[in-house]
Amino acid sequence: MNHEMREVLDLTAHFQTEAEKILRYELNPFVEGDSIAEHLARAARLLTYLTPGLKEEFPDQPTLVGDIFVCLMVHDDDEIIEGFDIPTAIKNHDVKNDEEISAFAQSISGLSEDRQKFLIETFSSFRNKSSLAAKIAKALDNITGNQLVIEQKIGLINPDSARFCIEYAQKVTGVSKVIDELVTAQIEQVVEGREKLKADQHEIWRISKVSNLPGTSKVKELLDIDVMNHVLDKSKVYTTLVDL
C-alpha cells in the first residue's frame, strides 16, 4: 500500500469537506451563502478567465498561472484548520502569520518532505506576499470576496460597506496591468450598482421592506451619498440599514 498517496487522498478529502462546511460572511448582514470551497472555486474560475492576459503580460514567467492557482488553493487552509472564517472588515490581517504557517505545516506533516516543502513555501508566500504569484493570488482573493456584496445588491446601499469594497480592491493594485484593469472594472460595478438601485423604485421598496424600514426614504438617502468621496468608517461596514 502506498501510504503517502493514502495521506494525499485523506488530506484532500478532509480539507475539501471542511471547506464546504465553513461559511464566509457569517457576520455580514448583506450577504447570504458562500463557503470557503465556493470562494476557492470562484477565484479559480476568475484566474482561468484572466489567464490569456496574464500570459501576455508576463511572457517570461511560464509557470506563473500555475503558481497562482496552487497559491489560491491553499490560501485559506488556515481558516479550514481553525474551523471558522473571520469577516474581512474586522479581521486583523497578517498578525498571526507565523502561527498559521506553523499550524499548516503540522497539518501536512504526514506527507513526504518534498511535498511538505512545496506546500509550506506556497502557503507562506501567500501569507508574506513574497512572490508575484502570491500578490496576484491575494488580488484575486480580494476581488472575489467583493463579488457577492456587489451581486446581492443590498450591501451596496450602506455607504461604508460599498466604500470598503472599493478600498479592498484598491489595496491590490500595482502588481499587474491585468489586475489593475480588473480593479477598475469592479469599482465601476460598485458605483454603477448604486446608481441602478437609485433608479429602481421597486427594488428600493423591496429592500426597505426586508430591512424592516418604515419607508423608502432611508435607502434613498444612503444611495445619494457619493461613495467615491465617502470616508470609510470600518465600524459601520456591517451595520444594518435599520441601524444606520
Image (spheres, rainbow, N blue to C red):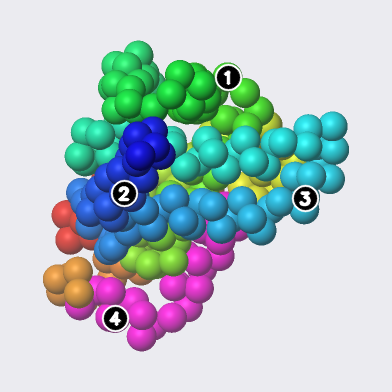
Residue shown at 62% from the left, 35% from the top: 67
Q: Look at discs 4 and 3 and give the one toward the viewer.
A: 3
Residue 212 in sight from this viewpoint: yes
Tell which residue pokes out farthest to the top in this image.
98
Among numbered discs 3 and 1, the one appearing first in the sequence: 3
Q: Can you identify the residue that label 2 sits on?
A: 13
Horizontal side, residue 17 vs residue 189: left or right: left
Task: Tell me the amino acid under the disc marked 1.
Answer: Ser
Which element type, helix, strand or loop, lies under badge 4? Answer: helix
Residue 44 falls left or right of residue 18: right
Q: Is residue 178 shown in magenta?
A: no
Q: Position of residue 75 (x, y in %)?
A: 43, 35
Main SS, magenta region, reads: helix
In terms of depth relative to the viewer, which is nearer, 188 or 115?
Answer: 115
x then y, percent, for residue 153: 39, 67
Tell me what residue is drawn at x 20 percent, y 74 percent.
Answer: 210
Q: CA distance from mark 3 to mark 1?
A: 22 Å
Spatial CA span between label 1 and label 4: 47 Å
Instruction: Say which amino acid is labelled 2.
Output: Ala
Q: Secondary structure at mark 3?
A: helix
Classify residue 46 as left or right of residue 181.
left
Q: Nearer the viewer, mark 2 or mark 3?
A: 2
Find disc 4 in the rendering and name its residue: 205
